[in-house]
Amino acid sequence: MKAVILAGGYGTRLSEETDVRPKPMVEIGHRPILWHIMKIYAHYGVTDFIICCGYKGRYIKEYFYNYHLQNADMKINLTTRDTTFLNDETEPWTVSLIDTGDGTLTGGRLKRVRHLLDDEPFFFTYGDGVANIDIAASLAFHRAHGLLATMTAVQPPGRFGTFTLAQDSVVKRFREKPQGDDAWINGGFFVLDPAVIDYIDGDDTSWERDPLERLARDNQLAAYQHDGFWHPMDTLKDKNTLNDLWDGPDSAPWAVWSAAPEALSSSTDHGPSAPRRNGDATSTRSYVSS
């Protein structure tokens, strides 16, 4: 399966960093947050990535083009320029780096990479947030419900698009950034069928508005509840918080790759009554919202 990651926005609320680099390249523990997100997926065997570049996208392209050079020890003969790599720390990933335009909105970026997707479900997320979400369980949940789209539901303070959850786990109404706390919000980490791209009109379409709202009205949007760790990186304070967690005495909560790798399952036997636990802090409950 493939994972599509949005990495083209301006990141204006983190201008201290994004004046010189795109937000997905802002570092947590000396690695871009984009790398952390990809490591989460890779822990579950997802190693085929489509990165939707835009603002300062050349930084992302240069990072991956020189990935081996940056992550391996090496010996160079300065006379002949022969280079020998002494170890290999390169990730076994395939990374497609696609220029989706500086000003393109989130839905438009996804629509621009449709030609790279297969006919099977794919993962879709933002390039500025981490979580210890159980990716395999979210896929099983998506397949068990048989809807076009599954979003991850999280419950931090209310500053993102919210929805109300119903017993059958189908989202019937979606609202972008209402006032108030304690609501379930869009935490990203979607599982989508390719047909959702038909809900996107073009470059000026925000994924969080018309497409999600229409999917909810059509009873095609499920909510996978994640009550473990989730944290966005919208501001300098968020960046510092994540670095403090990374540098702290315990493993960062989202570093699921420090445990034994897990694999995705092609079966659909993980129904809504079969939550899974990921790491030492994550539990999930599956249902659909209204």
Image (spheres, helix red, strand yellow):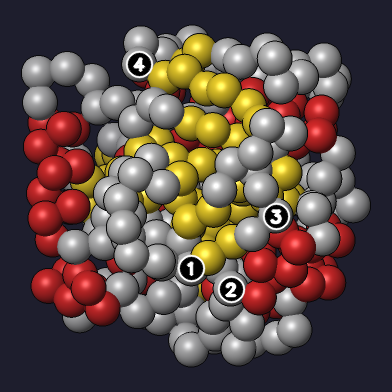
Q: CA distance from mark 1 to mark 2?
A: 7 Å
Q: Look at label 3 and name its amino acid.
A: Lys
At a point 59% along the width and 61% down the height, the residue shown is: 174
Return the x and y of residue 136 as percentages of the image width and height.
64, 25
Q: Amino acid at mark 2?
A: Arg
Q: Residues within 10 Å of mark 1 (few under 14, many from 20)?
A: some
Q: Which mark is residue 172?
A: 3
Amino acid found under the numbered disc labelled 4: Ala
Q: Which residue is labeled 4 in the image? A: 281
Residue at image x 54%, y 16%? 261
Q: Secondary structure at mark 3?
A: loop
Write down the residue under mark 2.
209
Asked whether the viewer can see residue 215, the reply is yes
| For the residues bearing labels 1 and 2, Cβ distance under 8 angstroms | yes
* Residue picked out by circle 1: 176
Q: CA distance from mark 4 to mark 2?
A: 32 Å
Q: Earlier in the sequence, mark 3 or mark 2?
A: 3
| Along the line of sight, the residue nearer the viewer: 75 or 270 | 270
Q: CA distance from mark 4 to mark 3?
A: 30 Å
Q: Residues within 10 Å of mark 3 (few under 14, many from 20)?
A: many
Q: Earlier in the sequence, mark 1 or mark 2?
A: 1
Proximity of marks 4 and 2: CB atoms separated by less than 8 Å: no
Amino acid type for the residue under numbered disc 1: Glu
User: Residue 26 placed where, x, y %?
Assistant: 25, 59
Q: CA distance from mark 3 to mark 2?
A: 14 Å
Query: Quarter holding the N terminus?
Result: top right
Which callout, 1 or 4, points at the residue further toward the start of the chain? 1
First reached walking from the N terminus: tag 4 or tag 3: 3
Q: Where is residue 218 drawn, in percent x and y?
A: 82, 60
Q: Would you say 121 lies left or right of 24 here?
A: right
